[in-house]
Image (tube, rainbow, N blue to C red):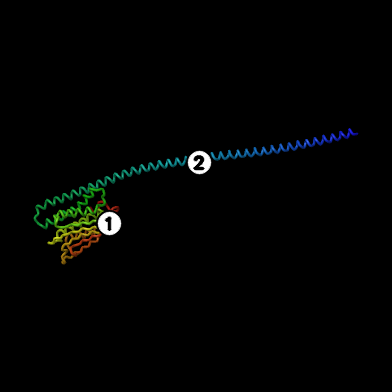
Amino acid sequence: MLSRNYNKQIGRMQMTFDLQKKDQEIAFKAKHIDLLTHQNQLQNSALHSQKMIRNLFIASVLLLMALLAVLYNRYKLKHQANNDLQEQQEEINTQNEYLRQLVDEREWLLKEVHHRVKNNLQIVISLLNSQLSNIKDVVAIDVIRDSQNRMRSISLIHQKLYQFDNLATIDAGDYIREIALYLQDSFDTFGHIKLRVDVAPVRLDVSQAVPIGLILNEAITNSIKYAFADQTDKQVSINLTSTDNHVRLMISDNGKGLSPEIDIKQSKSLGMQLMTGLSRQIRAQLKITSNNGLTIELEWQQADPFHTSTHRGV
């Protein structure tokens, strides 16, 4: 009886042991399964990360290739544009060189024209001078000399245009001084009549220089020939000023002035008609006053050399 109970107890203990062992094995297997599951999740996560990295790398490579393609295309376009610009610049340079040659040729031709006109005027002046020895009439001699002086005033302009590069304007100071000195020499007034010249730095357009030179010639000639009697202090003053694109020329003397019987507006003299007509030609205001001598005042607007011909009126 005792032996049977003992065997039953041993059997129950063995069964309990087996059950505990199986429970332990089941628990171990469950932990192992959880570990495998976690490893699988880590592997899947690693694979997903690798896939994302691979996709990002491929996208980066594609983007870089696209960027390189765009840069290469822009380089080709820029290179082509540079080639086109270079060709255009070469064409422009060729045209500019051609135009420069045309301008140089034109300026040379104009200078040659001025040179020949000046020479022709000098020939005419010399011919008139040679005729003076055969003429006895004092009036005729005066007329010829006055004509020589007028032609000399015109000749000076052509001489200056031939000598310098600027074919549109001449220096007013040099021009006025040369006319004044020439008239002094022509009438041999050195030491007898004092000539004062005060000229502002003004450049005269060629279209205005000829009329102004002729008016200046007439005014100075008139003062030298008719202004003075027996007075000792004989003086002719020439003053040129410029203000706000307006130029004023004054020729005055300290002589006896005009006779009260002379009406300036009704004068029929050639000199007065020349000054009146030439002042109208350049749209200048001409004013003549007789007070302690004679004053001839001329005021005009300075011409724009870029809108006037370089040879008009010459």
State the mark number for residue 32: none
Q: Which amino acid does label 2 sit on?
A: Leu
Classify residue 163 as left or right of residue 41: left
Which is nearer the eye, 274 or 13? 13
* SS under mark 2: helix
Considering only order in the chain, which callout, 2 or 1, is on the residue closer to the N terminus? 2
Q: Which residue is drawn at 27% across and 56% down?
A: 302
Residue 41 on image: x %, y %: 66, 39
Which is nearer the eye, 58 or 235? 235
Q: Is residue 283 visible?
A: no
Give the quadrant of the N terminus: top right
Q: Which amino acid does label 1 sit on?
A: Gln
Q: Is residue 152 visible?
A: yes
Residue 285 on image: x %, y %: 24, 61
- Labelled pair 1, 2 in contact (Cβ < 8 Å): no
Residue furthest bottom as drawn: 260
Residue 135 on image: x %, y %: 9, 54
Query: How many neighbours does mark 1 have within 10 angstroms: few (below 14), some (14-19), or many (20 or more)?
Result: many
Q: Which residue is drawn at 13% across and 51% down?
A: 129
Query: How many neighbours does mark 2 have within 10 angstroms: few (below 14), some (14-19), or many (20 or more)?
Result: few
Q: In which quarter of the image is residue 176?
A: bottom left
Residue located beneath label 1 in the image = 302
Which is nearer the eye, 87 or 172? 172
Residue located beneath label 2 in the image = 67
Classify residue 53 as left or right of residue 84: right
